[in-house]
Image (spheres, rainbow, N blue to C red):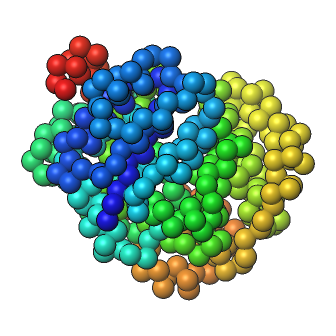
Amino acid sequence: MRLTALIANWNRREELAALLADLQQQTLPPEEVIVVDDGSTDGAPQMVRERFPEVRLIALEQNQGFNHARNLGIQAATGEVIVSLDNDLRLLDPSFLEKLRCSFAVHPDCATLSFGVIDGVWRPEQVPPGATVVPFSTLEAMATAGQAPLPAHFCYDWFIFMGAAALRRTLFERVGLLDESFRYGGEEWDLAFRCHAAGLRLGYDSRLWVVHTRSPAMRSPAVSDLILRNMVVALARFLPLPDLLALLVVQGAVASVRGLRQRRFGSTLRVFTDIARHWPRDVAPKRRPISSAVLRRYYALRMRHLTDFRQVEAARENVLSFYWTQLTRHGRQRSEPRVVAAMRPEAVPSPARAHQEH
């Protein structure tokens, strides 16, 4: 199985360098590595040329959007499987790609495999309630010793996290490329629904674990608002009218409560006002409501971690049961505990140290 590792990059030179170094250290490296640089101004393209000459670099002169960059990489890739990686991931497990090949062999029905993502936190207040905090150095030691922070678990999934997933090339031949009208956020929901409508199966394998270092500066409120807006737009294109109305009511209520708590209600209101204003352009012409059978499978996948697809096909969940489980907090959960990485500045090499290590 020929693999293409695809990384879209913008102004994260050292994080990109660390990830490329991880790919070099794999026991079974990818046959091809493509970096699409989306108009970086921090010297990232020159770094790739000088320190990773084997990498295929597509350097754009101007920033044209994350999904445009990813689509260029997908079109240029020659692998049977495209491993889509955010530029701030770390592949600490040197056998990661070897395990990925094995997982696809064991699950030949899956068009995608999403990875177990361990999010990095830089401050104690960023730790989610109930999460287990593991120092980054401990994760490095575990990877060296052949251990894993997450129990081995596979299930069928409803989503594709494009920053940490592997996708068969045939998927894009069936459903098309990423929707570039979503410059950032939203494309994953859109692509997942197109896959469900086409009858493709999406998988999740926690043995394929990665660390999402994220930025020491948490996601800005403006970016969070953009992601909320694009998520609602993407879902509105595919949900039948009753389910869409339920989504708008529930999501609007949740977002409003969060906005009030964070003293950002005005910003939240502007998100939904923007959705309404651009509905004739962004939603109405692209409405393709999924069938009732696909809708039942979608809710089942969101609510339960199913390992036998016959259970997915036999599901009878609906919008009422879905939101009831969400309300009572008994919705679908991963089988492994929530683990986050306590990050330190050295987790992403400084320019000097990275150059010495390379």
The relative height of residue 126 versus residue 76 in the rendered view (above or below) is above
Left/right of residue 221 with respect to residue 50 in the rendered view: right
Relative to 123, 319 lies left or right: right
Say above or below: 332 vs 144: below
The residue that appears at 29% across and 31% down in the rendered structure is: 52
In the displayed structure, 212 sits above or below 238; it is: above
* Quadrant where the image shows the C terminus: top left
- Could you say which is closer to the camera, residue 266 or residue 167? 167
Does residue 343 appear in this view?
Answer: no
Tell me which residue sits at (90%, 48%) in the image: 280
Can the viewer see residue 275 in this picture?
Answer: yes
Residue shown at the point (25%, 35%) measured from the top left = 21
At which x and y percent is residue 99? 25, 60
Quadrant housing residue 154:
bottom left
Residue 260 as seen in the image, left or right of residue 217: right
Name the one closer to the observer, 337 or 236. 236
Residue 185, horizontal then vertical, whole percent: 61, 42
Q: Quadrant of the N terminus?
A: bottom left
Which residue sits furthest top? 352
| Residue that extends furthest to the left in the rendered view of this protein | 145
Q: Quadrant of residue 14?
A: top left
Question: Is residue 24 left or right of 274 when viewed as pictured?
Answer: left
Q: Position of residue 120 (x, y in %)?
A: 36, 34
Front in this rendered view, residue 286 or 338: 286
**Which residue is pictured at 61% across the width and 24% down the height?**
62
Horizontal and vertical percent position of residue 37: 49, 31
Q: How many marks?
A: 0
